[in-house]
Image: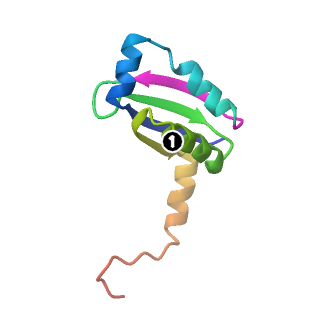
Amino acid sequence: MPLYLSRFSYTPETWARLIVHPEDRTKAAESYIKSVGGKLHGFWYAFGTHDGYSLWEAPDNVSMAAVALAISGGGALSSFETTVLLTVDETLDALRRAERVQYRPPGVER
């Protein structure tokens, strides 16, 4: 199954609620991905541009999109970004296929 890395940030209101009622959100994240047949591999908080990160496994892009849309639509986050991760073998395959792509940069004639 494909792996996905999500980066998220809470709204100030969500942080305020969590300060009053601290909650481990790992269980919630796990239930969201399980609802589409996936698995949560990790859930972390961080300093920096994003408040947290999660690593998910989902059956396909549509399943992960459903989870991302449901979470994003919930109103607790100010941002939610998801990136599909490629294995080394998938990247090597893509590199081999890239040679067959006849890319032409903008403004350059052949």
Q: In this view, does 10 lie to the left or right of 99?
A: left
Q: Nearer the viewer, residue 108 or 100?
A: 108
Above/below status of 89 relative to 107? above
Q: In this view, does 100 lie to the left or right of 66?
A: left
Write the start and end of the magenta stretch as one range. Answer: 36-45
Identify which residue is drawn at 44% across, 32% down.
Answer: 76
In which quarter of the view is residue 8 placed? top left
Say which quadrant the C terminus sits in. Answer: bottom left
Q: Most extreme residue toward the bottom, as rendered?
A: 110
Residue 92 in view of the camera: yes
Position of residue 82 relative to residue 77, above or below, is: below
Task: Say which residue label 1 marks.
Answer: 73
Q: Main secondary structure of the magenta part?
A: strand
Q: Residue 33 at x, y = what percent?
A: 63, 33
Instruction: Identify which residue is drawn at 50% across, 72% down.
Output: 101
| Spot occupied by residue 58 in the image (x, y as percentages of width and height) | 64, 39
